[in-house]
Image (cartoon, rainbow, N blue to C red):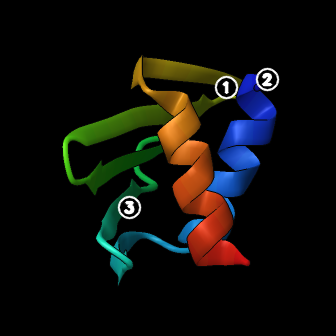
Amino acid sequence: MPNKAMLSRLMAALPHEGEVRYHADQMSMLVTRHDQPYTLISVIVKTPGHAGWVTAELDAGEVTLHHPRNLELVDKALDAFLA
């Protein structure tokens, strides 16, 4: 998934600075967001026996994904919790 598309999905999960947790059907997702001095959104997803995470950074219009792991699970969680 392109970096900007992932950032858009993460911003939909948490449109303001702070932290939010989602839980359902043995899946949990934690999203944190900080907007100073640039936007940084981190997500951690856990299911029994699996985990996935990514940090998206938006600085001066450039999007960078840091430390992605198991992005398929992150996508699945975003689909489940933001539907």
Above or below, 38 against 57 in this view is: below
Amino acid type of the residue that numbered disc 1 sits on in the rendered structure? Val
* Circles 1, 2 touching at the beta carbon (< 8 Å): no
Q: Position of residue 65 (x, y in %)?
A: 53, 22
Amino acid type of the residue that numbered disc 2 sits on in the rendered structure? Pro
- Name the mark nearer the viewer: 1 or 2: 2
- Name the mark nearer the viewer: 1 or 3: 3
Identify the disc placed on residue 4. Answer: none
Q: Where does label 2 land, which residue?
A: 2
Q: Position of residue 39 (x, y in %)?
A: 51, 46
**Quadrant in which residue 81 is drawn:** bottom right
Q: Secondary structure at mark 3?
A: strand
Give whichever of discs 2 and 3 has the lower sequence position.
Answer: 2
The Cα–Cα distance between marks 2 and 3, rounded to whole angstroms, is 19 Å
Q: Position of residue 18 (x, y in %)?
A: 35, 73
Q: Where does label 3 land, which residue?
A: 31
Q: Could you tell whether 35 is left or right of 67 in the image?
A: right
